[in-house]
């Protein structure tokens, strides 16, 4: 039974670390141990991609062949206190966006670039018009537009700055697109004004889409710039859903077999679309209720889109219609996202542990509000968790202490009955009954607590506030590894000390493995973010203190 208990504990411990390690590799952009590596080719060239929003059958929107034929437009650069934005007069697309207050994950000397259009990377925000009316063409994101005069930077004392684009007439219809940037905000107001100068009424539909290449940013073997990368959407009916690029490719293939050019995900009267990556995301938000359709598409080789299509109603001859939307592009600050739109905070991906992770982040954020430091907030949170699980841990430690106390008798039995295994097991069971020891009594507390600690792992891994957040002294960024490796060394020492506190297995091979395996796994923590190592170290220290106290009470030290 001792061996069984020991085996179960090691299986749990090993499986947990293997799963965490595999998830960490996927954060790195490295292939999972349990699935093939994703394709990494990147769409080449800086030409605007084809629309991910084809119109209904028989209606051409922005065919792929037209993309490369569109001449380069005028690039407009606009700066605010949080953005440096680049917009293209072709379609009024947002083709570049730097977050001036956030550094790049891989090179902290550079700014974080969210939207981009270059030889190695494509990530764009686009919008335009389509229609179900056969033979009617409307301005879209490939239509040449003129840039209207205006300021190109947020002036001191001003709260907003805007830039407008006006299309040429397409079938008598003109589209004016206005971006409004607000001081201190990662939201951009986008107004679309449709004027019908033709002699007949038109029924335009507005599409808002995000286009991105399918490349998951790669880090080195250990440090992770991204978590889930790809499109997501939310409706009240279906809640939050995310889409792997490979799944969009399959759906595109299935749609093509049916003669369709895109995959229609859902129709609703509410919801938003987003493009998600580690720490940051973009999203098109239309707060006002109204009918809309959600679509995904593979628009070119290794280029994918998610779109929201909204009917604007009938626009009579010489009439006009206006529509306002919000484009969010910035860090995944959970409380701010939650205030912007229902469910938008879900882009901060906690996976299957969301139901536990969300309250843990709420508590962590509250502690940060009181302590003013994310490092001390982590320490305080682990202390609170240890208090919450005190009696559960105490039960496990008492079981270990009893096992350690009777270990000399067990060793003597194994030596005496080494040639009589059946009688040895009977005698060991007799000792367990007499001493009221459950050999697997330490396993249940571990199983119960595991989801909470794994959820906390994902909270710390996903929280953008940890970037550039200092703790003490040499720890100036909790999201990167300890530059002096002091925390990992302390964690290794604490892990070995915990091993010493546990009862020694009678089997010499198991006894050696008890020392070797923690040492091997500790090596990984030398490359983990300092915030995660601080969490594990604090947990170890508190565990050691509680185990030492219980061992002393029971005379097992």
Image: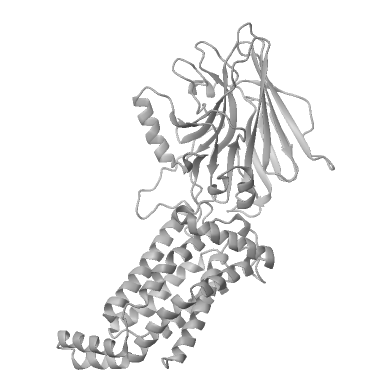
Considering only vertical position in the picture, is 350 above or below 364? above
Horizontal and vertical percent for residue 258? 35, 24
- Position of the C terminus, as image quadrant, is bottom left
With 535 as the anchor, is 90 left or right in this view? right
Choose between 326 and 169: the one closer to the eye: 326
Residue at the extreme right of the image, as rendered: 157
Considering only vertical position in the picture, is 433 above or below 9? below
Choose between 467 and 16: the one closer to the eye: 16
With 440 as the anchor, is 43 left or right in this view? right
State the residue at coordinates (32%, 77%). Answer: 440
With 228 as the anchor, is 475 left or right in this view? right
State the residue at coordinates (46%, 86%). Answer: 550
Horizontal and vertical percent for residue 322? 67, 23
Which quadrant would residue 209 be assigned to in this image? Answer: top right
- Position of the N terminus, as image quadrant, is bottom left
Q: Would you say residue 281 is visible in this rendering? A: yes
State the residue at coordinates (45%, 72%). Answer: 522
State the residue at coordinates (14%, 88%). Answer: 420
Q: Would you say residue 295 is visible in this rendering? A: no
Which quadrant would residue 12 be assigned to in this image? Answer: bottom left
Residue at the extreme top of the image, as rendered: 199
* Display coloring: one colour
Horizontal and vertical percent for residue 51? 52, 26
Which quadrant would residue 179 be assigned to in this image? Answer: top right
Total count of labels:
0
């Amino acid at each position: 039974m001792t061996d069984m208990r020991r085996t179960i504990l090691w299986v749990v411990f090993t499986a947990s670390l293997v799963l965490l390690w595999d998830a960490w590799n996927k954060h790195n952009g490295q292939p999972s141990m349990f699935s093939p590596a994703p394709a990494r080719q990147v769409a080449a060239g800086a030409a605007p991609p084809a629309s991910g929003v084809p119109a209904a059958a028989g209606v051409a929107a922005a065919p792929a062949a037209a993309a490369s034929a569109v001449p380069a437009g005028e690039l407009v650069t606009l700066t605010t206190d949080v953005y440096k934005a680049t917009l293209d007069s072709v379609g009024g697309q947002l083709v570049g966006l730097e977050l001036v207050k956030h550094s790049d994950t891989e090179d902290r000397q550079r700014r974080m670039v969210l939207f981009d259009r270059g030889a190695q990377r494509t990530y764009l925000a686009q919008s335009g018009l389509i229609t179900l009316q056969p033979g009617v063409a409307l301005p879209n994101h490939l239509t040449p537009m003129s840039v209207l005069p205006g300021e190109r930077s947020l002036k001191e004392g001003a709260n907003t700055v805007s830039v407008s684009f006006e299309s040429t007439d397409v079938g008598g219809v003109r589209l004016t697109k206005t971006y409004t940037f607000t001081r201190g905000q990662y939201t951009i107001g986008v107004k679309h004004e449709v004027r019908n100068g033709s002699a007949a009424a038109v029924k335009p539909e507005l599409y808002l889409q995000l286009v991105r290449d399918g490349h998951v940013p790669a880090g080195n073997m250990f440090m992770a710039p991204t978590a889930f990368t790809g499109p997501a959407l939310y409706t009240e009916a279906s809640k939050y859903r995310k889409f792997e690029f490979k799944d969009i490719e399959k759906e595109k293939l299935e749609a093509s077999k049916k003669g369709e050019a895109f995959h229609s995900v859902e129709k609703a009267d509410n919801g938003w679309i987003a493009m998600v990556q580690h720490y940051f995301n973009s999203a098109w938000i239309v707060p006002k209720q109204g009918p809309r359709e959600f679509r995904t598409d593979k628009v070119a080789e290794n280029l994918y889109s998610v779109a929201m299509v909204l009917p604007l109603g009938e626009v009579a001859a010489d009439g006009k219609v206006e529509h306002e939307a919000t484009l969010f592009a910035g860090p995944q600050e959970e409380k701010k996202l939650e205030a912007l739109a229902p469910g938008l905070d879900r882009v901060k991906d906690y996976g299957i542990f969301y139901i536990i992770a969300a309250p843990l982040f709420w508590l962590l954020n509250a502690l940060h509000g009181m302590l003013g430091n994310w490092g001390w907030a982590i320490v305080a949170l682990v202390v609170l968790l240890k208090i919450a699980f005190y009696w559960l841990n105490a039960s496990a430690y008492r079981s270990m202490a009893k096992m350690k106390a009777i270990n000399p008798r067990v060793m003597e039995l194994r030596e005496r009955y080494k040639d009589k295994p059946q009688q040895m097991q009977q005698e060991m069971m007799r000792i367990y009954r007499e001493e009221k020891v459950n050999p697997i009594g330490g396993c249940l507390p571990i199983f119960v607590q595991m989801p909470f600690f794994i959820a906390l792992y994902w909270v710390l891994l996903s929280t953008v506030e940890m970037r550039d957040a200092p703790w003490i002294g040499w720890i100036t960024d909790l999201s990167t590894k300890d530059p002096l490796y002091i925390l990992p060394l302390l964690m290794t020492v604490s892990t070995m000390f915990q091993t010493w506190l546990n009862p020694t297995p009678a089997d010499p091979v198991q006894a050696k493995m008890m020392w070797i395996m923690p040492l091997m796994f500790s090596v990984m923590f030398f490359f983990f973010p300092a915030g995660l190592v601080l969490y594990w170290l604090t947990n170890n220290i508190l565990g050691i203190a509680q185990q030492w106290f219980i061992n002393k009470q029971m005379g097992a030290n």
